[in-house]
C-alpha cells in the first residue's frame, strides 16, 4: 500500500503542478513549492533513515508522504490565495474544477493520515489494541466524513443549486421507471454472479477483507459493518466517484475519459480489500464500469446509486438465503451456539456434517471444542479435515499451531 500511495503522490503532484501553471503562468514561475531550506532538512532526514532504519525503502516512502504533503499543501494554498488566482470570467472552468479535485484528494489524504495517527496513539495510550473490524469501521467513517466535507466545499463552484444537484443526485429527462428498472436488473444480475462465485468455489482465497470478517467477535460490530455496507457505502461512494469526480473529469476531458478513469479508479481503490482474490478484483472492475456506464447513459447519479444499493444488499442477502437452505443445520448451530452446552453443540455439528460433509467450517468448530477440552488428537483430526477441504487457509493453519502448542 505504501508503494501505491507514493506513486500516486508523485503522479498527482505532477498533474496538479501542470494545472496550477495553466491557471496563471507568470505567478506560477515566481512560486517555489519546495523551498531550499525544507529540501536540505528533508535530505538530512532521509539520509538518517537510510543509515539507521532496517526497512529503509518503506520508511523513506512513508516519511516522504508525511513530510512533503503538508509542506506542499501549505505552499499550494499560499499560491492559490494570490489575488491573480481568484477565479474570474477569463478562467477555463474545467481547469479550475480539476485543480480543485486534486486539492480535495491531497487535503483528504492529509487529514485521514492525521486521524489514523491519532487513533493509533489513543490505542497505545489506553494500552488496548483495536480489532481489525473496529479499525475498519473507524477508518471508513473518518475517511468518508473527511472526503465528503472537502467535496461539499468544492462543489460550490459548480452552481448555486445545492450540493445534491451539483453531484448529479437529480432526475434527468429520461423515464424514471426505465432508469430504476435497468438499475435494479443490473444490480441483481451482478449480485447473483458474485453470490454464485462465493458459494461455488472449492477454496475461498484469503484476502485482507476476509481476514477482517473472520476476526469479528461482536454482534454489534457486525451490525455496524452491515449498516455501513448496505445503507451508507453505496450513496457515499456514488457521490464521490460518479457524482463529483465523474463530473470534474467529464467537464475537463469528456465522457469517455471520465468513464474509463472513474471505473478504473473505483476498481483500484478496492484492490486492497481483495488482494489475492483476482476473480473478485475482476468482478469489482466490471461493476465499476457498469455503474459508471449507467451514470453516463442516464445523466444522473441516482441511477448508479440505485444499482449500487441493490448490488450491496443482494450480495449479502442472496448467499444468506442459499446458505440457510443448503447449510441449515450449521446456520442453526451458529444462531444457538451461545445457548447450548458441549453435548448439544457436538450433536448439532455432527448433524451438520451429515447434511454437508464437505463444509470446512463445521470441522473448524469441532476442532475448537476438542481443543478447549484438551483432546489434542481429535482436535488435530478435525482441523486436518478442514485443511483437506480448504488447503492453505491461514486461519486454519493458525488454529492448528495453537492446538499443537
Image (cartoon, rainbow, N blue to C red):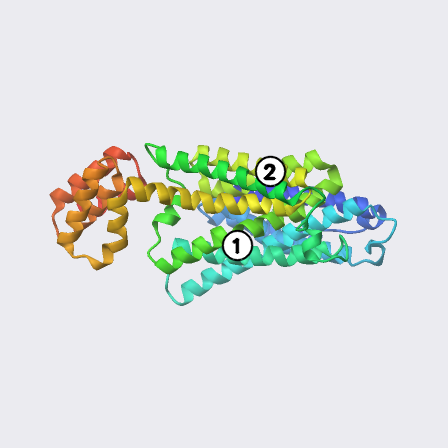
Q: Secondary structure at mark 1?
A: helix
- Which residue does the image show at 64% across and 45% down from the upper left? 176
List x then y, in percent, for residue 145: 57, 58
Closer to the N terminus: mark 2 or mark 1?
Answer: 1
Spatial distance from mark 2 to mark 1, Cα to Cα?
A: 20 Å
In terms of depth relative to the viewer, which is nearer, 197 or 355? 355
- Which residue does the image show at 77% across and 54% down from the upper left? 159
What residue did someone put label 2 on?
A: 263
List x then y, in percent, for residue 8: 60, 42
Tag 2 and tag 1, C-beta contact below 8 Å: no
- Which residue does the image show at 78% across and 51% down from the upper left? 31
The quarter of the picture where residue 110 lies is bottom right
Q: Residues within 10 Å of mark 2 (few under 14, many from 20)?
A: many
Above or below residue 109? Residue 284 is above
In terms of depth relative to the viewer, which is nearer, 233 or 50? 233
What residue did someone put label 1 on?
A: 232
- Which residue does the image show at 52% across and 40% down from the upper left? 187
In terms of depth relative to the viewer, which is nearer, 350 or 379? 350
Query: Which dot, 2 or 1, sits closer to the camera?
Result: 1
Amino acid at each position: 500500500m505504501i508503494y501505491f500511495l507514493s506513486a500516486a503522490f508523485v503522479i498527482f503532484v505532477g498533474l496538479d503542478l501542470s494545472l496550477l501553471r495553466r491557471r496563471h503562468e507568470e505567478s506560477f514561475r515566481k512560486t517555489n513549492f519546495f523551498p531550499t531550506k525544507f529540501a536540505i532538512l528533508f535530505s538530512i532526514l532521509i539520509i538518517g533513515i537510510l543509515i539507521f532504519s532496517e526497512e529503509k525503502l518503506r520508511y523513506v516512502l512513508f516519511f516522504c508522504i508525511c513530510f512533503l504533503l503538508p509542506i506542499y499543501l501549505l505552499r499550494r494554498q499560499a499560491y492559490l490565495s494570490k489575488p491573480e488566482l481568484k477565479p474570474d470570467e477569463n478562467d477555463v472552468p474545467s481547469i479550475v474544477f480539476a485543480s480543485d479535485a486534486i486539492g480535495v484528494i491531497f487535503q483528504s489524504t492529509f487529514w485521514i493520515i492525521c486521524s489514523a495517527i491519532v487513533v493509533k496513539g489513543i490505542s497505545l495510550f489506553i494500552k488496548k489494541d483495536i480489532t481489525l473490524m473496529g479499525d475498519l469501521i473507524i477508518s471508513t467513517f473518518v475517511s468518508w466524513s473527511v472526503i465528503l466535507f472537502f467535496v461539499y466545499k468544492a462543489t460550490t463552484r459548480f452552481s448555486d443549486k445545492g450540493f445534491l444537484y451539483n453531484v448529479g443526485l437529480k432526475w434527468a429527462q429520461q423515464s424514471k421507471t426505465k432508469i430504476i428498472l435497468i438499475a435494479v436488473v443490473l444490480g441483481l444480475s451482478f449480485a447473483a454472479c458474485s453470490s454464485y462465485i462465493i458459494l461455488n468455489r472449492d477454496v475461498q482465497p484469503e484476502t485482507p477483507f476476509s481476514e477482517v470478517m473472520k476476526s469479528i467477535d461482536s454482534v454489534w460490530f457486525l451490525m455496524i459493518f452491515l449498516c455501513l455496507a448496505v445503507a451508507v457505502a453505496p450513496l457515499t461512494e456514488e457521490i464521490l466517484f460518479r457524482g463529483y469526480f465523474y463530473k470534474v473529469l467529464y467537464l475537463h476531458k469528456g465522457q469517455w475519459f471520465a468513464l474509463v478513469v472513474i471505473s478504473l479508479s473505483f476498481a483500484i481503490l478496492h484492490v486492497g480489500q481483495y488482494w489475492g482474490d483476482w476473480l473478485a478484483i475482476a468482478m469489482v472492475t466490471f461493476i465499476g464500469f457498469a455503474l459508471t456506464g449507467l451514470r453516463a447513459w442516464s445523466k444522473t447519479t441516482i441511477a448508479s446509486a440505485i444499482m449500487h444499493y441493490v448490488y450491496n444488499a443482494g450480495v449479502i442477502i442472496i448467499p444468506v438465503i442459499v446458505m440457510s437452505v443448503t447449510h441449515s443445520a450449521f446456520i442453526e448451530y451458529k444462531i444457538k451456539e451461545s445457548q447450548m452446552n458441549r453435548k448439544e453443540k457436538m450433536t448439532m455439528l455432527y448433524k451438520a456434517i451429515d447434511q454437508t460433509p464437505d463444509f470446512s467450517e463445521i470441522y473448524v468448530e469441532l476442532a475448537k471444542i476438542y481443543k478447549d477440552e484438551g483432546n489434542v488428537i481429535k482436535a488435530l483430526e478435525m482441523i486436518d479435515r478442514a485443511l483437506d477441504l480448504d488447503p492453505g487457509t491461514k486461519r486454519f493453519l493458525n488454529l492448528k499451531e495453537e492446538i499443537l502448542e
